[in-house]
Image (tube, helix red, strand yellow):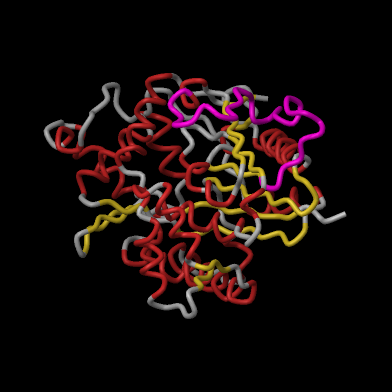
């Protein structure tokens, strides 16, 4: 079993990108808030797996009294803003390291499961990689106290073939997929009172959470926003290129070949994660891909962020304006257009992004 670990230079560049543009990825975090929200969760404990520099855990502070951050890369945890409850550990084996008596109220993992894989002779062994990812997920569910919640978020593959529209193009299939998901979440009623976002905005003002919520409130009532309304609001992707939304291609063709540490991965499928969570005994399971577009103030900032977040190119660039002077600016910009899609309108630049969200609750005893 293998898990990829990133070096010090990659960690520095990743952290620099998030520190300058923490607002870029906030649409990845907001669905997690919907899934974890409870009125009395403030006194509970979170384990954030593959926590890195604490980007997600920092946003979840208003929800939890204690946050335990776990990461295998010392370079990432060393850049964390807090030294409290940091555990240097392989996320696959974390259940063997923590005390047997510790049961937590939530386990989160953002964009790390795909780094767990098994290699064959010269490429990823798909069936064995599914197996080791499934084993890791099962271990994580055992960390949960009764009533505890698991939220897994990763680059993943939506089950478009299950929607019954075999003659649709990829763009049509994605559009239909999200229409179906939006209708489903209107029935599920995942919603949040907006006072929580005021608290998050105070803790991490750079994330610009309040701006996103203000946009949502224009279509909601009674100070409550829902997961269904979020999907509707985030469907900016159809103003870009929905056929570019399968984010895995960007990793396989660009990050794997041009990142300073490379990128080896096995991206989970929606149906595979569904089966694992059902086998684990979790209840109220929810699995879906969601549009989570990245938003920037300028095109130069967008290109710079992608370059530094993924460590593309041997030499770090400290500022977006400096990147404009370099020959690889146009090269990386072309990659973004080719594999993701990017558009500038109304003073903002949007980059297509899509993630798989998986959620389940451990039954109360």
Q: Position of residue 6 (x, y in %)?
A: 47, 23
Q: Position of residue 292 (x, y in %)?
A: 44, 56
Q: Position of residue 108 (x, y in %)?
A: 61, 44
Q: Is residue 134 left or right of residue 167?
A: right
Residue placed most toward the observer, 238 or 166: 238
Task: Residue 306: name its quadrant.
Answer: top left
Q: Residue furthest right?
A: 365
Residue placed most toward the observer, 152 or 330: 152
Q: Is residue 328 left or right of residue 56?
A: left
Q: Is residue 222 above or below residue 73?
A: below
Q: Is residue 23 magenta?
A: no
Q: Name the image quarter holding the N terminus.
A: top right
Q: Position of residue 178 (x, y in %)?
A: 51, 68
Q: Is residue 227 left or right of residue 200?
A: right
Residue placed most toward the observer, 254 or 178: 178
Q: Is residue 230 above or below residue 92?
A: below
Residue drawn at x 40%, y 34% is: 255
- Residue range (magenta): 78-106
Secondary structure mostly seen in the magenta stretch: loop
Residue drawn at x 45%, y 48% is: 247
């Amino acid at each position: 079993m293998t898990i990829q670990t990133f070096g010090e230079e990659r960690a520095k560049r990743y952290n620099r990108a998030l520190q300058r543009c923490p607002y870029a990825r906030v649409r990845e975090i907001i669905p997690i808030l919907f899934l974890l929200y409870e009125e009395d969760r403030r006194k509970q404990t979170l384990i954030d797996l593959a926590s890195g520099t604490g980007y997600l855990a920092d946003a979840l502070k208003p929800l939890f009294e204690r946050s335990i951050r776990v990461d295998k890369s010392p370079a990432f945890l060393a850049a964390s803003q807090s030294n409290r409850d940091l555990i240097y550990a392989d996320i696959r084996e974390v259940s063997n390291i923590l005390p047997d008596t510790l049961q937590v109220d939530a386990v989160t993992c953002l964009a790390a499961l795909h780094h767990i894989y098994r290699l064959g002779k010269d490429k990823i062994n798909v069936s064995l990689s599914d197996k080791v990812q499934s084993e890791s997920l099962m271990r994580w569910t055992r960390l949960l106290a009764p009533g505890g919640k698991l939220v897994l978020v990763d680059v993943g593959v939506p089950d478009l073939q299950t929607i019954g529209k075999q003659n649709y193009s990829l763009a049509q299939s994605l559009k239909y997929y999200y229409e179906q998901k939006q209708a489903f979440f209107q029935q599920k009623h995942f919603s949040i009172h907006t006072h929580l976002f005021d608290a998050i905005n105070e803790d991490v003002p750079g994330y610009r959470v309040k701006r996103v919520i203000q946009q949502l409130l224009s279509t909601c009532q009674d100070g409550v926003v829902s997961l269904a309304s979020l999907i509707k609001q985030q469907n900016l992707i159809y103003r870009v290129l929905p056929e570019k939304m399968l984010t895995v291609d960007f990793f396989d063709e660009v990050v794997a070949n041009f990142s300073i540490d490379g990128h080896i991965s096995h991206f989970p499928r929606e149906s595979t994660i569904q089966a694992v969570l059902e086998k684990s005994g979790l209840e109220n399971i929810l699995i879906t891909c969601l549009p989570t577009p990245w938003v920037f103030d300028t095109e130069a900032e967008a290109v710079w962020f992608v370059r530094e977040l993924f460590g593309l190119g041997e030499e770090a660039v400290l500022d977006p304006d400096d990147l404009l002077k370099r020959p690889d600016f146009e090269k990386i910009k072309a990659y973004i257009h080719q594999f993701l899609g990017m558009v500038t309108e109304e003073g903002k630049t949007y980059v297509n992004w899509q993630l798989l969200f998986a959620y389940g609750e451990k039954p109360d005893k």
